[in-house]
Amino acid sequence: MIPPRISGLLRAAAAVALTLPRGANAQAPAEQPIAYVLSVAAPARHMAHVRVEIPTDGHETLDLLLPAWTPGYYAAENHAAGVDSVTARGAGGAALPVRRTGANHWEVETRGAPVVTLSYRIRADGRGPTGDYVGDSAMVLNGRATWLTPAGYAQRDVRVSLALPPGWRSFTPLDTASDRASDHYRASGYAELSDAPIVAGPGETVEFDVAGTTHLLADVAAPAGFSHEQAGRSLLRLVVEVQRFWGFLPYQRYEFLNVFGPGAGGPGHLNATVLAGRADLLDAPGRLEAWLGDAARGYFRAFDGTRLHPAEYAVMDYDTRPATPSLWVSDGLGAYYAQLLQERAGLLRQQDFLDALSALIARAQGDPMRRSQTLTAASLDAGTPLKPRERRLDWTARGAVVGFLLDAHLRAATNGAKSLDDVMRLAYQRFSGTAGYSDAQFRALVSEVAGSDQTAWLAQALDSADELNYKEMLDWYGLRFDGGWNLAVVEPPPKAAAAARDTAATGIPTPAQQQQHLTALLKPDAGPATGPAAPPSGG
């Protein structure tokens, strides 16, 4: 186990680095950096070799660890199972004792050596959302599965060098090292390093600027004839809409790392997201829409889930995921906005957007735990290992649906003057940065934006296992469920019947008003209604 004092230093420093935008990190300390060299000599064997030089700073032992979980993917992980052949050497190449001290910890006796050279091998044969993959044509490295780090060194400057097969290029949001050499990078501490994916292989890129910031699409191992420009144009439209939504972009550079091959994409990071490319990405029906959905969800985490995060993540514990009741915000609302912002960007048609929401509703309504576990309880329980036949509520799907219903509720409560958009912008303005928001603070913010007490509504949606109430949303937008949970626009009645409807008596807007409400959701006026014109300090 990590000694409490050292563990606290590691976690506290990680919390600071997690929220800093690219290029805004504190000045690196003067100490000798930790230097990693990762080599891929035989990619077909799905192996990578790592050598790292660690200054000992006079410590008798070094406690090395790999994180046991990843933000945005809350299952307990065992990245350490993919690490073997761990050896250490000191001055003159003398072998140093290494022993396993825990599921994800190793201890090295330094025996007075000023620098320890650690070597280990990574088995990278499965491209899960947060694991490593090395194959004939591509490599994907997720920092928390790759870089063994010494406890107590969280703010230590880091250098990374890659030795890749001929013809391969590497792409990562990490800054280029001071020597400007290819495949050489640097990070201002382990939090930045562990949050920065690295992909490599034969690659092509498309760059575009939005609001003075650079965005890169890197297509790795793409098939011949793939239109990088077409994919890049779609991402450009997405980024423009997200910038319009927030009113700013909080980074200097962002990368969409699109890897063609086995496996899936991963959760979004501070300055990048990894996507799973397919040979038929631009041709097969629905494939581009699904890919853009993944891109939108990962990209939205550059705001909601990283810079804006639950208060429980202000202290990063690499061994244990902190329990938070707020995953419906950091995950669920992101899933809702991933669809909504695509529609606003013109990447989805209106019915495509409704179909995407229908799928989320069907997923939430088909969840066998929906009447047994609340959204708050599922969030707090995330990451806890399940026993055989045990289940947990899908907090992402239900959180997305609650976000959709809350958005309609706020619009109806304020007669269209306010919406969930205003809540998100105000939350970022107040709570982005190191501290984050508490559950109580976010709920209070909803009431503040609504101009009325929303405690009961939120308690019903978050703290109750009762069925969700869709009537207000359906009435406000003029929608109906057409067979199962499929959303469709209500056909307007004959003019005479429409004119005879008494909105004040029925509480249901007229068809014309309903159409206006749906238009306001999907095509709001350009520019954010409220919120900062520039990112807050430290955002």
Image (cartoon, rainbow, N blue to C red):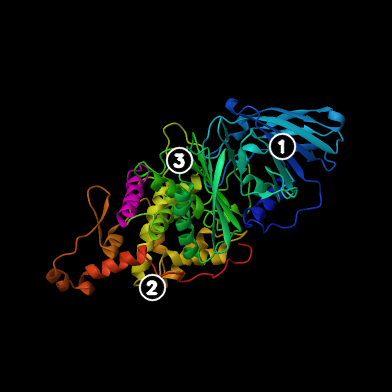
Vertical side of 70 occupied by 25: above or below: below
- Mark 1 and mark 3 lie on one chain; the one further toward the N terminus is 1
Label 2, secondary structure: give it: loop
Identify whether 516 is placed above or below 129: below
Q: Visible in this render: residue 241?
A: yes
| Residue 480 located left or right of residue 214 | left
Whole-number angstrom distance, CA of label 2 to CA of label 3: 48 Å
Q: Estimate how packed mark 1 is, as few (under 14), some (14 to 19) or many (20 or more) residues with alpha carbons within 10 Å.
A: some
Residue receiving disc 1: 37
Relative to residue 239, is residue 114 depicted above or below?
Answer: above
Q: Earlier in the sequence, mark 2 or mark 1?
A: 1
Circle nearer the viewer, 2 or 1:
1
Residues marked 1 and 3 touching at CB (< 8 Å): no
| 519 relative to 452 in the view: left or right | left
Q: Which residue is mark 2?
A: 417
The residue carrying pointer 2 sits among few (fewer than 14), some (14 to 19) or many (20 or more) residues within 10 Å by Cα, namely few
The residue positioned 54% from the left and 70% from the top of the image is 533
Under mark 1, the amino acid is Val
Give the number of the disc on residue 225.
Answer: 3
The x, y position of residue 103, in whole percent, is 64, 32
Q: Could you tell whether 284 is left or right of 71 in the image?
A: left
Residue lying furthest front: 225
Residue range (magenta): 350-370
Residue 151 screen position, x and y as percent: 72, 42
The mark lying in front, picked from 1 and 3, is: 3
Helix, strand or loop for disc 1: strand
Q: Amino acid at mark 2?
A: Ala
Viewer can see residue 141: no
Residue 359, labelled with which disc?
A: none
Residue at mark 2 to residue at mark 1: CA–CA distance? 55 Å
Left or right of residue 112, residue 399 in this image: left
Q: In the rendered structure, which amino acid carries the disc numbered 3? A: Gly
